[in-house]
Amino acid sequence: MKSAKSYIAENKQRFIDELIELLKIPSISADSAYKSDVIKTAQLVKSSLEKAGCTTVEICDTPGNPIVYGERIIDPKLPTILVYGHYDVQPPDPLNLWDSPPFEPIIKKTELHPDGALYARGSCDDKGQMYMHVKALEYMTATGQLPCNVKFMIEGEEEVGSKNLGGFVQQNHEKLANNVILISDTGMIANDIPSITTGLRGLSYVEVEVTGPNRDLHSGLYGGAVANPINVMTKMIASLHDENNHITIPGFYDDVEELSLEERAKMAEAPFSKEAYCKALDIADVYGEKGYTTNERNSIRPTLDVNGIWGGYTGEGAKTVIASKAYAKISMRLVPHQDWVKITDLFKNHFESIAPKGVTVKVTPHHGGQGYVTPIDNIGYRAAEKAYESTFGKTPIPQRSGGSIPIVALFEQELKSKTILMGFGLDSDAIHSPNEHFGIWNYLKGIETIPQFFHYFTEMTK
């Protein structure tokens, strides 16, 4: 039988070209102006699954963007792996910070990616990583080495909170029935240090609006006499952290899981260079909650960050006004046991309570989700561990991620199966940022490793 490595070598350029075609389509779910591109991408994913070997593929309509479902059932008695991914992408803004157009993919060699990296929005998050599974299926079906049943559920709303995926899952228990869920929407420590993500943070995302006078005012005539919504809002936001960067919302930490010293020591085994970290980000020093390391701050501790803030005049030149309104978008990354609905309510009540009488406050929740932890003693994790060992030649390190995939907790609740997070991107791949990229080596290594997971998971469940 042909090995994955030799099959990939023979088809390498085609695999890259196909991904480039997928990356050219601006499937931005946050902007309705790109609705037709979202639909076009879903159709391309459907076609790709059919060519790769799925015997049934359909585009499932939802009140929002469609979900692409595919399957290949070779024997109902064999285990079934459900692959989840998403084809929608983040907006590319700010465009002026991209070195090349975000939807005109190019390959560039870098120090971290000597074999080249694909630069385009969605290259790593998540089109490139999702497409690894499509090509892995192609290899397994083309060579007669698919060891079990496989299903695909590829959605188009992950970047806006998977608003309609929950309902789809709840209504399709039988269609989506599986023994394990496999996702590649995370990363690993380094190309020579493979890791498996065992935890995801939850998320609460809100927008705040602070309103002062009923219109914009002349800052000379009214400055100092009425509350300036921008001044007020920035003070309110600044008060959400204390001098130790501890979040000040009452009750915010009530359900936070405190890891033991032993667990924290295990996390500390993961290699980390503060110097390299700062150099990569062009910063003088790290910053965060007192008493925790950088790797702990961005994985096992909750956070609150302003993602956007605006109001008043921001055009060229000067316009001396006191704005009537100020706005901000705020995200809170949550750890397991923190309920995102409860945290959203705590934020809303607190933010409204600290507003001075001269303004009114409106808090609009957007979306959220619960955190998730995968136990490392289950069959799925052990199969993933052996898969990495077979292709990387070393045992992967279990690692908690700072990111969120809000739908994962619902998968376990509704489908009663564990999720395994096999990511092949790197922290430096600039997901959600200008110049997002995904290493060619990482892309092909994922295609090589995924079939090994199928093999070991099937073997372990016999």
Image (cartoon, grey):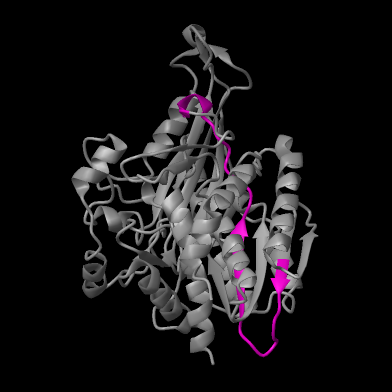
Residue at 75%, 47% (x, y): give it. Answer: 39
Residue 224, image x, y percentages: 43, 16
Q: Is residue 421 left or right of residue 241?
A: right
Say which quarter of the image contains residue 37: top right
Range covered by the magenta-colored residues: 70-99
Residue 459, image x, y percentages: 50, 87
Residue 445, image x, y percentages: 44, 60
Q: Is residue 239 above or below residue 339?
A: above
Q: Does the magenta stretch include residue 374?
A: no
Taking the view exactly as shown, the residue that stands out farthest to the bottom is 462
Q: In this view, does 170 lie to the left or right of 388?
A: right
Residue at 34%, 56% (x, y): give it. Answer: 191
Residue 322 vs residue 281, the one in the foreground: 281
Q: Residue 391: in sight, yes or no? A: yes
Q: Does the magenta stretch include residue 72?
A: yes
Q: In this view, does 49 lie above or below 237?
A: below
